[in-house]
Amino acid sequence: MSQSPTLPREARVRRLLDTAESHARNRRAARAVFFYRKVLALAGSGEYERELAHLRLADLHLGRGEPQGAVHHVGLAIKLGGQGPDYALLLGRALLELGRLDEAAAALHQALQDGPLRVEAFTLLGDVLAAQGDRTGAAALIRHAAEGRPSDLALRRRLRELSDA
């Protein structure tokens, strides 16, 4: 995508962000990363597009099995003013993958504030407890999560795994 020098900077940032989002939606992660980085190079520190680019890069890093990169980018998004359960959930997932269990639990507790994210937050908190060796506590949290999604087979399978051991 070539950028016209006559477009105002804000319009170029918006166009780059739209292109990055399109690539991300179409599962072209490498292209999405390329354009999100262009957004970061052009957007100012107070602009929401910069925060969003960091948040999306965090999600892409996590999806690529790079939790350290995810922690880095979600941390920058939070420093830019990003708050809320979705930021906390993403941070908690990345910290859990890094084995930073206490930090992951703290972040995931913040994610419990949001109704739609509660099931995933409870599930991940269960994973934290399981990693800490508390299978009973983990099963209780995952059972609670399964109540929120009774038809979720993956949650039922996790619950069976915890109760079988």
Image (cartoon, helix red, strand yellow):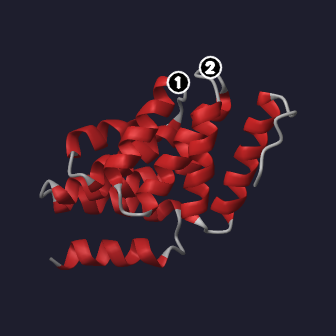
Q: Does residue 39 sit above or below 18 in this rendering?
A: above
2 with respect to 21 (left or right): right
Of 118 and 100, nearer the camera is: 100
Cα distance in 3D space between marks 1 and 2: 7 Å
Which quadrant holds residue 11? top right
Percent across and percent down for residue 38 are 61, 43
Judge by depth and name the residue closer to the eye, 158 or 15: 15
Report the side of 60 relative to 162 (left or right). right
The amino acid on which the numbered mark 2 sits, given as a three-letter code, is: Gly
Q: Callout 2: 10 Å neighbours few (<14), some, many (20+)?
A: few
- Label 2, secondary structure: give it: loop
Is there CB contact under 8 Å for labels 1 and 2? yes
Q: Is residue 53 visible?
A: yes
Query: In the image, what residue occupies the spot 36% across and 78% down?
Result: 157
| Disc 2 target residue | 46
Along the viewing direction, whichever of 74 and 159 lies nearer the viewer: 74
Kind of residue at badge 1: Leu
